Image (cartoon, coloured by chain):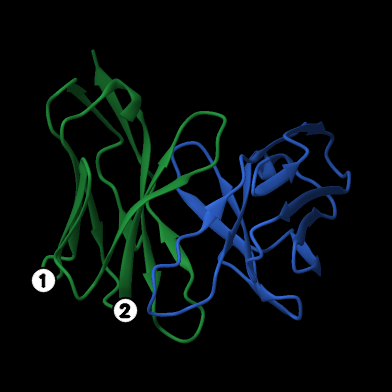
Chain colours: A blue, B green
Amino acid sequence: DADVTQTPRNRITKTGKRIMLECSQTKGHDRMYWYRQDPGLGLRLIYYSFDVKDINKGEISDGYSVSRQAQAKFSLSLESAIPNQTALYFCATSEPGEGRNQPQHFGDGTRLSIL
Amino acid sequence: DQQVKQNSPSLSVQEGRISILNCDYTNSMFDYFLWYKKYPAEGPTFLISISSIKDKNEDGRFTVFLNKSAKHLSLHIVPSQPGDSAVYFCAARDSGGSNYKLTFGKGTLLTVNP
């Protein structure tokens, strides 16, 4: 089983709909992240959470919201989807421990298309 | 303004030869650098990293070199194998404040030809 699981893997929806992407992890990591990837661009950070009570905006948070329901669960919502939010979305986790190697571990992504 | 730049969108090499992927950065507060590898339909997977206090880190066929004065790092893969064909992302960690977020480059598509 994957350590970082994203659901759904693919979603097609219409402009104006509310969408929720879910992420769960079995790695026991405190830190969780949501990124989006667009063609020709790298991964850009949407939101991140260092623990259940800590939520922070990333570089492109407008139009998105998140909920950290538990240590293992971090969901991303698009309240009213628009076509330019069509992208590949990744959830990631990491351990704390500044000064030590703390790579982020990614799920396999959710491909979201908004018509 | 892009703080992590991978100026080569793609690279093609022959099997058995060396692959060199380059990355430049602008933020002096970056203290840790990572390379990720991504296959289609999968998430990025961590490959190798280097601290800003070092200039080289090696793991099997993969070596990362860091030149702090030039704000440049490179990933060397020797020998290259067809299974190495993937998109490679350079990422940097910002030690400023308490956030420790990663900033990613746009990626380089490596194709290793048999």
Q: In the image, what residue occupies the spot 32% across and 73% down?
A: B30
Q: Name the residue nearer the viewer: A4 or A59.
A: A4
**SS class of the residue under badge 2?**
loop
Labels 1 and 2 positioned on one and the same chain: yes
Residue on which the image places disc 2: B29
Q: Earlier in the sequence, mark 1 or mark 2?
A: 2
Tell me if B51 is positioned left or right of A35 in this view: left
Q: Quadrant of residue B94?
A: bottom left
- Residue B113's spot in the image, x, y percent? 24, 16
Tag 2, which chain? B
- Residue B97's spot in the image, x, y percent? 46, 87
Tag 2: residue type?
A: Met
- Residue A109's spot in the image, x, y percent? 63, 41
Q: In the image, what residue occupies the spot 26% across and 76% down?
A: B28
User: Is A49 located above or below residue B63 in the figure?
Assistant: below
User: Is B1 located above or below residue B17 in the figure?
Assistant: below
Tag 1, which chain? B
- Residue A108's spot in the image, x, y percent? 61, 39
Residue on which the image places disc 1: B69
Tag 1: residue type?
A: Ser
Q: Name the residue nearer the viewer: B112 or B30.
A: B112
Tell me if B10 is positioned left or right of B17 in this view: right
Q: In the image, what residue occupies the spot 31% across and 79% down?
A: B29
Q: Quadrant of the N terminus of chain A?
A: top right
Q: Quadrant of the C terminus of chain A?
A: top right
**SS class of the residue under badge 1?**
loop
Tell me if B80 is positioned left or right of A111 in this view: left
Q: Residue furthest bottom?
A: B97
In space, the residues marked 1 and 2 are separated at their CA atoms by 13 Å
Q: Residue A88 — which label?
A: none
